[in-house]
Image (tube, grey):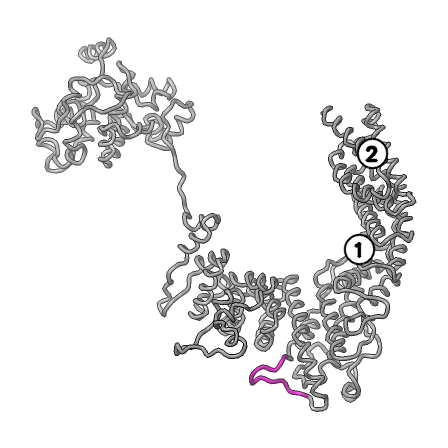
Amino acid sequence: MATLKTQEVAVLRAATYRLSSTPSKQLPSIAPQIAAQLWTCKDLLSSTADSAKQGNDASTVVHRFKTHLSTLLQDRTVEGRWSAVVLVKATIEAGGIEVLSKSNAWVRNLLGILKKPDPPTTRNLATIALTRIFMLTWEYSSLVREITTPALPTFVATCLSNAENKRCSASELSTVLEAFAVLLPRHPTIFRTNETQIRALLVRILSATPSSPLEGFHYTVAHQAVAQRVLVLLHHCSPKQGSAGKWDETLKAAVTSAHATCDRLFRSLLEDWKSVAGVRPSASPNALLQGEMELESNDQLGLTGWKGVYAGSERLVAHMDMIKTQTNLATAGSVTVRLGMVSDLLTRVLSLRVPYGKHNTKPNIQISTDEREALFSNMPSVHVAALQLINALLHRFGMTVVAVVLPLLSQTTWVFESEKSDVDARAATYTVLTSVLRLQGPSMAREDVADVEAIVRACCQDLLPAGDSTTSPSNGAPVQQSGATSDLGLQASKAAASAPTLHGDVRAAAEALLPLCISKLDPAYVPGRLRALVERTVVLTQHKDALVACVLNPALKGKASSAQASLLPLLAIQHPDAPEVEALLRPRMPFVRTRNTGHEDEDEADDYNEDDVGVDGHAEEDGMDGAAVDATNGAEDDNEPTDGLLSALGQQDAPAMGEELYSVSPPETVQATQNSGPGPAGAYSHAAELGAEKRRADAAPEHERSAKRMQGSPVAESLLPSGAHSLSGPDPTTVQSRVPATVVIEPPQSSYMTAPEPSQQSITLPAAPAQASASVHSQAAADVGDDDSDFEMPPLTMDASDDEEESEDDED
C-alpha cells in the first residue's frame, strides 16, 4: 500500500512539474495526457485531511497541484485557461467528494471564463465542466446548498446571454441546450425565473426552417431536436400542482397547430377525413383557398408564420416531432394523454398519399397543379414523421393502445404501396410493423397478414444482394439491352449489381423485422411463396435470429398441416458457435456421471449406496435382508450379458460400489477378485468396506457365509432359472446368453488381479454339469460353487475364522 501511494505521489509531482515548466502556448497539447494521468492518482486526491497530515510529502504535492490549477484558471493567455478548464474537470471527477467540497473557488473562476470573450471552445468546455460539477452535487444536499444553489442562477443567465449572441457557435449552442435539458428537471425553481427568456430562445430555434431561415442565425436539425426536449421540460417550472396542466396545454397546442398547418397544406386535395375529436377548421374555406399558401400569424405553440408548400411541410413535421418528444420524455407527475386527439391527427395525415396506380387522390381544381405536385414531393417526409410518431406511441403505451393498432396499421400499409420507393418511408414502415408484431402479431387474422405481405416482400428485397434480387423473363428469352448498357457492352446482371449501397437505417430496420415475421405470424396464414422468399432471404443473408425463428416455427405445407424440412442443418453450418444453435442441437444433454474408483469419504459412499443398489442402505430402509438384496443385484446384472464378457476379458472398468459379492453376475466376481484379499474381509463389496462399523457388523451374518451354508441359502433358490429346464440342470439358453465359450481361453489380463487358482485356469463351458442333482438346493450350489460352472465364486483363502465358523455350525 505504501508503495502504491509513493507511485501516486511521484506521478502527481511529475504532472505538477510538467505544468509549471511548460510554456502557456504549449499547454493545450499536454493537458489531455496529464488529465489521463490523474486517474492513477485518484486515491491520493480523494484522501481526507487527516490522512494527508500523516504524510507531509503527499499533502504538499496535492496542495501544490491544486494551487497551480487555480493560477491557470486566472491565466492571461487563452491557452492557459483552456488547459485549466480541462484539468479542473478531470481533477474533480478523480478526487470525488474531497475535491468537490472545496471547489467553490474553481466554480467562480469557471463562471468568470464564461463571461469573458474567449473562443467558443473554451466557453463550451467551461459549460460542460460546470454542468458536471452541478450533477456531482446532487447526491449531497449540503453541497447543493453550498455550490449549486448560489452558482446556478448566474450560470443560466450567462448561458442565455451567450446563446443569443451572434458569436455563439453551433457546438456551444448545442452544449447550452443539453445542459438546460439535464439541469432543468432537478432545479425547476431556479430556471423558473428565466423561463420566459428560455421559451423565446426555443421558439426562435423551432421556427427557423431550411425554407424560411432567420436572418443572422442558423440552426441545425440537432438544435431543433434538443430545443423540443427543453420546451417540453419547461412544464417542470410550473408552480405546484400545475405541471400536469402545463404539459397537457403544450400537447393540445401542438395538435391544434398541426391541424392549422394541414388546413393550408392540403388545400390542393379534397380530403375524405372527418374529425372524430371535434377539431374545427382554423379558417373559412374561402379564406384558405385565396392567395398563396401561408400562415401569417404565430400558431398556438408560439412558432412564427410560414409561407409556401415546402415551409408548410417542414412546419407540420416539426409539430409531429414535438408530439413525439412529449410522448417519449418523462414528466414531473402523472398526466393525461389525449390519445384520441393524436390518433385523429395521424388519421388525417395518412389519409392522403401520392397517386399510385388506379388509386388516385381527388384534386382540388381551384388550386394550381404546381402546388399539388410540390405537395406530392413533400408527402413522403410528412408520412415518415407520422410513422415515427406511431412507433413512439406503441413503444410508450404498449398494450394500452391495442384498440388503435390495427387501424393505424391498415393506413400504414395503404401509404406504403405508393411510397415504398422512398428509403426513409421504407425504414419507418419496417419499424412500425416491428412494433405492431411484438404487440399483436399472434392475434392477427388472415386478412391482416395478407395486408402486410407487400411490406414483408419489400423487406426481403432490401436484404437480398443486388444481383440476387433481379428477375428474368419467364419464357427464357434473352433480355435486349439498350442505352448505356449496350453502348458499354455490359451485361444486364452487372448493370443491376451496380446499384447504390443500401442505407444503414433501412437495413437495420429490415433485419429487426424479418425474425418477427416468422415468429409472431401464424404459419397457417402465411402464403407458401412468401414463406419461401423469407427463408431464402434468411439463408442467403445468414441472419442468425431469423434462422432460429425458422427452425422454431416451421412452415406448414398442404391441408394436412405437416411441417416442411427444417433449416437446422443450415443454421448449424452457418452459426456453429452460437449458444442458440447448441441448445437446438442438444436440447437435453444428460449429466455425465463418472465411476468412482478410489476411496472416498464415508458420506460419498453412503450417497452412492442410496442412488445405486447398495448393501446396507436398502437393507436398512426397505427391511430386506442381505440375501434378498444379493438376489436383486444378480437379477439386474444378468440382464446385461455384455457386462460379464467385458469383465472376464479385463476390458471394463470396476463396477459401482453398490454391487454385491454373492450376486451371480460376472462383474461382481471380478470385482471381488481384484479388490479383496484373503480372509472373510474379501467377501465384502467395496461400498461395505467404506460403510460404518456398526452396519458392517450387522450385515456380516447375512453375507459372511461359507460354502456349506450356501447350500441352504435362499439366495440360491431365488437365482435358479424358472421354466421347464429348472429341475433337470442349468438352462442352456441362460448359459449361452451369459458367457460365451470363447471367454475362458486364457485368464483376464489385469495387473490388479490376484494369483489365479487351478480352478480359475480351467474355466470351460461344458455341455452339461458333470454332477447335477435333482434337488433344487444342490443345483443352486452347483451353479454357484462348482469348478465347472460358468459363474463360479472366486477362490477364498480359508483361515482360522472360517474353521471356527464351520465347527460352530456342526455343533449346532
Label drawn at residue 16: 2
Label drawn at residue 66: none
**Height in image: 618 above or below 526?**
above
Please say whether residue 158 is visible from this viewpoint. Answer: yes
Please say whether residue 444 is visible from this viewpoint. Answer: no
Relative depth, front residue between 622 and 221: 221
**Height in image: 461 above or below 19?**
below
Relative depth, front residue between 754 and 94: 94
**Height in image: 794 above or below 391?**
above
Name the image quarter holding residue 565. Answer: bottom left
Residue drawn at 41 percent across, 39 percent down:
591
Indicate the quadrant containing the C terminus: top left, top right, bottom left or bottom right: top left
Residue interval drawn in magenta: 353-363
Please name the residue that numbered disc 1 is placed on.
Answer: 175
What secondary structure is the stretch in magenta mostly built from? loop
Name the image quarter holding residue 398. Answer: bottom right
Relative depth, front residue between 50 and 374: 374
